[in-house]
Structure formats: structure tokens, C-alpha cells
Amino acid sequence: MEHVLFSDGNTKKIGWMIQTNDLVLEQKREHPGIYLDKVSNQQSKYIALHVGLFWSIGTFIIKNQDTVRLVLDDKIMLEHLSGNKKSPDKFIEKRKFFIRQLIEQRKLKIQYELLTQDKTWLLKK
């Protein structure tokens, strides 16, 4: 099965959207107190990707060995996840570890794509 996962985050909340065939699901969450207004927008994007991927696996949308196209709107994030480029931010490196762990445990086939259009609709409302 093939899926497209887009996620986004800011200092207040995270959100993700997953598309599988004609089914599109959106989820939004406010940051818990430990993160609310304490993480950067970029750190929040990693949280959103980690939680979105974990949620998609936990709700049986993404299954073992599925193909997942991760659509990212941050070129630096794309470089960090698709290659071996390290971030000087330890928080981001920890999120990368958890994301890669999920990918490896579930034997997911990951494709990375850079989103170039406006996506602010995900976190509005």
C-alpha cells in the first residue's frame, strides 16, 4: 500500500494529513504543556512528523512494509532525514532517532518530497 504523509507544526500545535488512495485523514493537536511555546517551529515539525507517523501506524493505516511518501516543506529537514546530515539541535536529533526507529521497525519504504506550495491550511482553525 502507498501513502502520502504531510505534517506541520508551530510553537502552539501540530497537525498531519495522510492520504491513502481516495481516503484523506487530517489530525490536529495542541502541544502539551512541556512543549507549548517552548519548541521552535522547526522542532515542532519533527514532533508532528513523529506523532503523525506513529498515529498512522497505531491506527493501522500504515502497515509493515508499506510505501510512505513523506512530504516536507523544509529543505533542511529534508536533508536531515533523507541523508546523514546532522542537526546541531539535540532535540531534533532525538526526534530523528524515533522517526528512523519507526521506519526500520516497520520496514517502511520511504520516499521524500519537498513541498513548494503554501500549506498553511493545515494548522488553521
Image (spheres, rainbow, N blue to C red):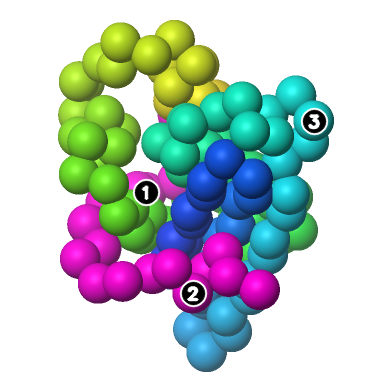
Question: Residue at horizontal 25%, vertical 63%?
Answer: 115
Foreground residue among 82 and 46 = 46
Specify the amino acid type for callout 3. Answer: Gly
Q: Position of residue 61 (x, y in %)?
A: 65, 64
Q: Name the residue furthest bottom.
A: 22
For the residues labelled 2 and 1, the Cα–Cα distance comes to 27 Å
Point out the residue furthest to the front here.
37
Q: Which residues are magenta?
A: 99-125
**In the rendered image, which residue does mark 2 sit on?**
121
Residue 73 versus residue 43 in the image, above or below: below
For the residue labelled by badge 2, is the local secondary structure a helix, a strand or a loop? helix
Task: Kindly identify the residue that appears in the image at 59 percent across and 84 percent down.
Answer: 23
**Residue drawn 32% across and 53% down?**
72
Taking the magenta stretch, the answer to whether it contains residue 88 is: no
Q: Give the quarter of the image for residue 34.
A: top right
Which badge, 2 or 3, is on the more N-terminal residue?
3
Q: Amino acid at mark 1?
A: Lys
Dividing the picture into quadrants, the one containing residue 41 is: top left
Q: Identify the image quadrant of the C terminus.
A: bottom right
Answer whether residue 18 is visible to the viewer in this image: no
What residue is disc 3 on? Answer: 33
Left or right: residue 40 versus residue 114 is: right
Q: Is there CB contact under 8 Å for labels 2 and 1?
A: no
How far, Cα to Cα, is label 2 from label 3? 24 Å
- How far across and down, in percent of the image, does residue 98 sit? 54, 25
Element under disc 3: loop
Q: Distance from label 3 to label 1 (Cα)?
A: 34 Å
Q: In the rendered image of this protein, does residue 50 appear above or below residue 7?
A: above
Residue wearing tag 1: 109
